[in-house]
Every structure is written in C-alpha cells, then in structure tokens.
Amino acid sequence: MVDWGIIANLLGGAVTTLWISSVSIAVGAPLGLMLAMTRVWRVPVLSQAVAVFVSIIRATPVITLALFVFFGIPAMGLTLSPTVAALITLSVNTSAFHAEIWRASIMDFPQNQSEAASAFGMTRLQAFRLIVLPQAWRASLPPMVNEMTFLIKSSPAIAVIGVVDLTRTASRIAAYTYDPLPPYISAAIIYAVVVFSLVRAQRVIERMIVRRYGVL
Amino acid sequence: MIDHFVRALTQWPLFLDGFFNTVWLCVFTAVVSLFLAMLLVVPLMSRLLPVRATARLVVDSVRSVPFLLLAYMAYYCLPAIGISLSSWAAALITLIVYNTAYFAEILRGAWSHLPPQQEEGGRAFGFTGIKLFVHIIGPQLFIAAGPVLGNQLIQVIKDSAFLMVITIPELTFRVNQVQSILFVPFETFIIAGCLYWVLCNSVEWMVRRLDQMAELRRAR
Amino acid sequence: MPDDKKNGTPVLQVRNLVKSFGDLRVLDNVSVTVDAGETVCVVGPSGSGKSTLLRCINLLEWPDSGEIILRGERIGFRKNNRSREVRMNDSEMAHIRTRVGMVFQQFNLWPHLTAFGNVTVSPIHVLKRPKQEVEAEADALLEKVGLEDKRDEYPIRLSGGQQQRVAIARALAMHPDVLLFDEPTSSLDPELVGEVLAVMKGLADEGRTMVVVTHEMGFAREAAGHVVFMDGGKVIETGSPEEFFSNPKTGRAQQFLERYR
C-alpha cells in the first residue's frame, strides 16, 4: 500500500533540497573562482585573507556553519529567514571548496601554453580569458560535480535551521505517523537516486572531455 | 564583542567536554571502521561477480545517502524494528557503518592501482591469503592511500557534528547549548570554528608527516 | 606578402646579445643579421644557446645586455618623453610579439581550440582584425599547409606533423615581420619530419623572412640564405650554406659537421 500523500510530501521536500542546492552551487562556483583568482594573482592583503577564510570554512562542519549563520547574523542586527540562511550557508561552504578546485586547475596550467599565448602577443588578461579559463573550467568540471554530490549529502544541515527539505519532511512524516521506516527509507532512496545520477554524470563528462580534448 | 567572548569562554568546561567527545568519537570510529574496511575490501575486489556486485551495491548505497539521514535512521528506525539503542550506540553505529563504506572504497581504489608485481612478488615468496594481505598488500595500501584516508578522517570529524541532532553532546551540540543560554551566538561559534580548525589541521599535518616518512622509504 | 626585398635595411638585427642564467653564460656577445626575404638557419650542438637566442628575439627571455632591432626600432625599449630609453611595459611588449611569429618545438597548440580556432584566436582577439577576414584567411592558410580537411579537429586528434603545420599556419596568420622556428622538427617522429620541412621550404621559397634553429642539415643546405653556427653561446662561424657545409673555416665547425657526414 503506497501512501501517495507521503510520497507527494517527500517529493516536495526533495524539490526544496534540489533548488536550494542548485542555487547554492550557482552562487558558490563563481564565487569560488573569484576567491581562487585573488590567490592566483597574489592580490596583496586580500589573497592572505582568502587563504585564511578558505582554510576555516573547509574545516568547519556544515551544520555548525548553518547554526552560526542562522543565530549569529541576527545577533548583529539583520534578520534572515531559514531559507536565506540555508542559501548563505551552502553557498559559502561550497565556495571554499570550489576555490581550491579552481586554484588547482589554474596553478597547474602548462607553462608551454602560456608561453605560446605570450608569444602571440596576448596580455596576461587575454591569455587568462582565451586560453587558461576555457581549459580550467573544463578540467574542473569533474571535481565540481563531485563537490555537488558532497553538497547534496551535507544539505540536511539546513533541516536543523528550519528549512523544510527532504530530511525535515521525512522527520515530520515519521513524527505524525509514528512510522519512521517508510518516510526515512523513501528519503534515502530519493537522495541515492540524485547522488547516483550525479556520479554517473561526472563519469560521462570526464570521458567526453578526455575524448574531445585529451587530458587538459 | 570582547566581553561576549569572555562570557562565552566562562563556559569552557562545556566546550572541553564537547571537544573531547568529538575527538574520542572520531578516533574510535576511525580505528573500528578502518579495520572493518579491510575486511570489506576483500569481497569488493573479489573475482566472483555476485560477491563483488553485492559488496559494490552496499558500499555505493551507503555512500550515496546523507550522513544525517543515516543517523536519523539508526536513531528512529532501528527501535521501530525492535532494536532499541541508546543515542550513543546509534551514533557509533552510524559513524562506523558510514565510514567503513568510505574507507573500503578508498582502499579498493588503492588496491586496484597497486602494481600486480607486488602481489606476485609476495606469492613468489610463499605468502598467501591473510598473511599476504597483512604483510605485503595491506601496508602498501595504507602508504599509497595515506593522504586520501587522512581526508576521510577530516570528513569523519565534520560529519560528527551532525550527531548533535540525536542529542549527542559533541562539540557543536555543546556550542549550541552555550549560545542558547548566553545569547552570544557569534562568539561561541567562532570558538567552535577555531576548535574544528585545530582538529582538522592537526589531522592534515599528521598525514603530511606520515606521507613524508613514507616518501623517504619509497625513495630508497 | 609582407616583405620588401632588398631595400637595404635588414628586417632583424641582433647586436652583442648577452644572457646568463646564474653562472652559466648562455649567450656571449651574439650578433646576427637577417635581411628581408632571407632564411637564416642557426645550427650548433645542444646547449649552444640557439633556443635562448630565439626566445630573446620575441622577448620570452630578457637579455642582460645587447640590442635587438626589428625594422629599425629597438625592441624592448622605447624613448620616453625625455628621450631617455625606458623599458617597454607589458602591453607594448605584447604588441612587439605580434610582429615576431614563433613556431615551438613542442608545437604548443591550445588543446581546447580546433585547428581553425588555434589559427584565428590571436588575429581576432589580439590584433582585433575583422572576424570574416581572419576566418577566410585561416581557411586559406590551413589549405596552404595541407590541412584544410582537419580544420575542425582538436589537437589531440592530430599527429605531431599535423600539429606543427597548424602551428605554422597559426604563426602566419599574424602577418609577422619575421618568423622564428625553434627546432620545429626535433619532437617529431622521423616519418613526419618531411611534411613540416616541405612547408617550411615553401615559405622560404616564397621569400618569407625566417630564422630557423634546426638540426636538419639537409634543410639548411637547401633553404638557408646564410647559416649561423653557434657553440658555447658564441657565434663561431657564419656563411652561405655552400661555404659552410663544404668548407667550414673553423675547427669546431668542422668537428660539428663530422657528425653529419
């Protein structure tokens, strides 16, 4: 006997998880790129600040960060809803990891290509825009998709600050039906499907890139 | 701000309690999970398809579910099927099951990249079965996978924070407790951030030292 | 065709170039002159400074002292408003590099761009030439080097010889005053060398101004206007290919050529 009401609820929670995760990645990835660039270009003062910031965020559990954002920011006078707090938490968290991913592909960039770019009269900025970045983002795609799976797996942290995501929906259903097995197991299956798809997508992307460009 | 910090720091016994709970939870998990992972990696690398496929399915399933959800399942679902557990037991079971899967996958990756000469050399000298693993393959796996295992240990530390939701008094739980009593959330969580930073970077430093020592051996 | 033959001023003059890396003096008072339409081949044992010479000409390396004069202007330096010589800034140097074409030993094609993309990217974005004009010329250049059917292939799918020919088309598309070749065939499998040398010979016959660092003595014999022999960072001997190959004047040149008999 499938209770379609429960399934509908869970899917609603899943949608919340997915849209919040997607927005966080959409914000976090470019933000991570900017952080990486301040370090690559050795911007004085800023690059050290970014290094410290990235180091701290990468060492902080997502749930701890969520609580910090949710309780700490209002303490400074600004009010924020759980959803906004969730978006800030996940975006900031993922940006720190993306910063390292970008930095790795940009710092590792083969010197002979940069030389060729220089020899053809490109300024540093032109070389970055035309030669380095197009390759760096393609090379970063597999680790970025990998980071997306981590983001989805740590997203239940937002349930703790009140966002009705998939996990919180499952908890609610378990609470009012006194039957924890169906909602939790269903939620686990939904998460598994999403993560499996992402992992599959990552492998496909990686293979496509290698086939078309070789190892970037 | 400073006075808030001072107020927060007056609760240092709670912070210390949380910190130590986190540390021993993670150490215990690491030891037990690594051991179990060594057992799990054998079916994972088995030449028999049904064995390998089953192990593969178990590992992939555990790795694709969020840790927090798994914790809830241990805490709420197991009692529902008759296994009643304390919150500590549920926490440890979750941590151990979850990380055994991750460690097993890491060791499997290292094993599949191990040059076959290693195993052949071991067999040539008469090592088989468990002895082969303990003396020849195992040490190689740990040396090769050191940094990745270290990374996973850092992940264990970070995942342990989720356990606050099933009322385990680890660091984040205690910090949250303090901030709700004293209303100094900003400062308390900064202290928490620093403590986690110290923990994670200690692990990273240790892993780097071990890797350097391993390098010296490899270079010879 | 950019070259005005024999109007007197050499296209490229290198005077008294000195360059050291730490204690090692890689270029020791090197001087070379390249006339319009001429192909100069630089030969010599490994480590004689030949590559460094090329890299100084297009400012990939900065010489310790000496002058490099391209069409009468000293490159790397300009006169400031007080008529003092001041080092060029990055964008001025970038501009100079567009006038000096370079073909690298390792081809150095950009892997995320097709052959066509590699040829067109710099003229469009650096020289800011109109897109249609650049694209039409790119097709013509790829045809010239025999690769019009590889236009939409990525470098990973091209053989070494094909990649190098694309690299040549890429350099030509910039309409440079002089083309530099840094051991263009040294990284190629032997059976692929010929196709690249054929293209280079064609360019030499057309009257392009070229400086070629090479170990391919056959090419030097046939295509060079004059040959420069370097050893230990110094120019030991120069001369026409006939003179150099049949009658080397210095002992070291004779020793070097022994290997190629």
Image (tube, rainbow, N blue to C red):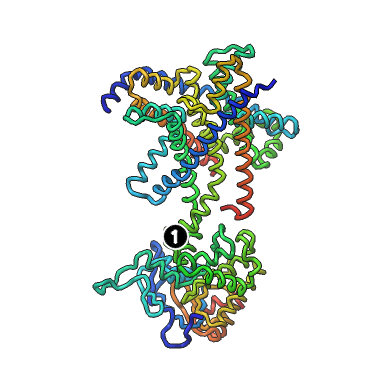
Q: Secondary structure at mark 1?
A: helix
Q: Residue furthest bottom?
A: C7
Task: Please indicate whether residue B11 sits to the left or right of residue B146 in the image.
Answer: left
Residue depicted at x 46% and y 57%: A129
Q: Which residue is mark 1?
A: A126
Q: Where residue C121 sits in the image (x, y, percent)?
A: 51, 64
The amino acid type of the residue labelled 1 equals Gln
Q: Is residue B34 visible?
A: no
Which chain does tag 1 point to?
A: A
Residue depicted at x 46% and y 88%: C6
**Above or below — where is C194 with respect to B212?**
below
Decide which of C253, B197 is in the foreground and name it: B197
Task: Please indicate whether residue C150 sits to the left or right of residue B49 in the image.
Answer: left
Decide which of B112, A115 is in the foreground and name it: A115
Q: Where residue A209 sits in the image (x, y, percent)?
A: 60, 51
State the quadrant of the N terminus of chain A: top right
